[in-house]
Amino acid sequence: DTGVSQDPRHKITKRGQNVTFRCDPISEHNRLYWYRQTLGQGPEFLTYFQNEAQLEKSRLLSDRFSAERPKGSFSTLEIQRTEQGDSAMYLCASSLAVGLYNEQFFGPGTRLTVL
Amino acid sequence: AQTVTQSQPEMSVQEAETVTLSCTYDTSESDYYLFWYKQPPSRQMILVIRQEAYKQQNATENRFSVNFQKAAKSFSLKISDSQLGDAAMYFCAYAGGSNYKLTFGKGTLLTVNP
């Protein structure tokens, strides 16, 4: 296993279109996180899953955003009716929750550009 | 809400020299974790070093060490013997006692000059 992977790496779309991103975590990692990173900022937490259950969503995750993790494996993040403000890098991370500490391993990200 | 502040948008260091990156945070929790992440240009973020708040001893990983001042809520990263490969954006991050979501600072862009 080579780490967290994300697909696509880059996505250019027109305003109003729907987009879907995929994240494949490190196998056997039971936690999966989504973050958004805009230019000049640090990543901001969006949501996270423990196995297939979505346990928390940030208020940044508007109704146009939905995330799933069927069967507790890969995850998808969908943005409906994209807006220019959605342009950002979307990062996925995974971890194995053991005891009190779990290091998050990040994927390379999907860079979204909304025209 | 927890906040993380990195007051140095950019720093530069000569190769083989030492540089310190600053980070302060605000929290009301007593149990938490602090991290420094490195994000090289167009590459994925990797963990450099972590510190558990309940540990008084400062963490060290090879050339990387931290100065953790819990009362002052300060968490600086020292890079010794800087190498060209250390050039990257460095993010300070916080995670609460349940240790799931990370709260990041805005980052410090480190340039290493040959």
Image: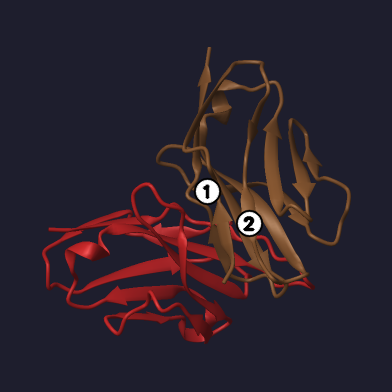
Chain colours: A red, B brown
Q: In the rendering, at what x and y percent does residue B73 appear?
A: 71, 54
Name the residue beneath numbered marker 2. Answer: B25
Residue reaching furthest right? B56
Q: Residue at x 40, y 41 (%)?
A: B42
Disc 2 crowd rating (10 Å Cα; few below 14, some 14-19, many 20+) is many
Residue type at tag 1: Met
Of all chains, the one bearing label 1 is B
In the picture provided, is B12 more to the left or to the right than A100? left
Q: In the rendering, at what x and y percent does residue A65 appear?
A: 31, 79
Q: In the rendering, at what x and y percent does residue A98 appear?
A: 76, 72
Q: Residue at x 54, y 81 (%)?
A: A72
| Circles 1 and 2 in contact, beta carbons < 8 Å | no
Q: Residue at x 80, y 40 (%)?
A: B60
Q: How many marks?
A: 2
Q: Nearer the viewer, mark 1 or mark 2?
A: 2
Labels 1 and 2 positioned on one and the same chain: yes
Q: Which mark is residue B45?
A: 1
Work out whether residue A90 or residue B106 is closer to the camera in this orientation and state it: B106
Image quadrant in which the N terminus of chain A is located: bottom right
Residue type at tag 2: Tyr
In the picture provided, is B32 more to the left or to the right than A14? right
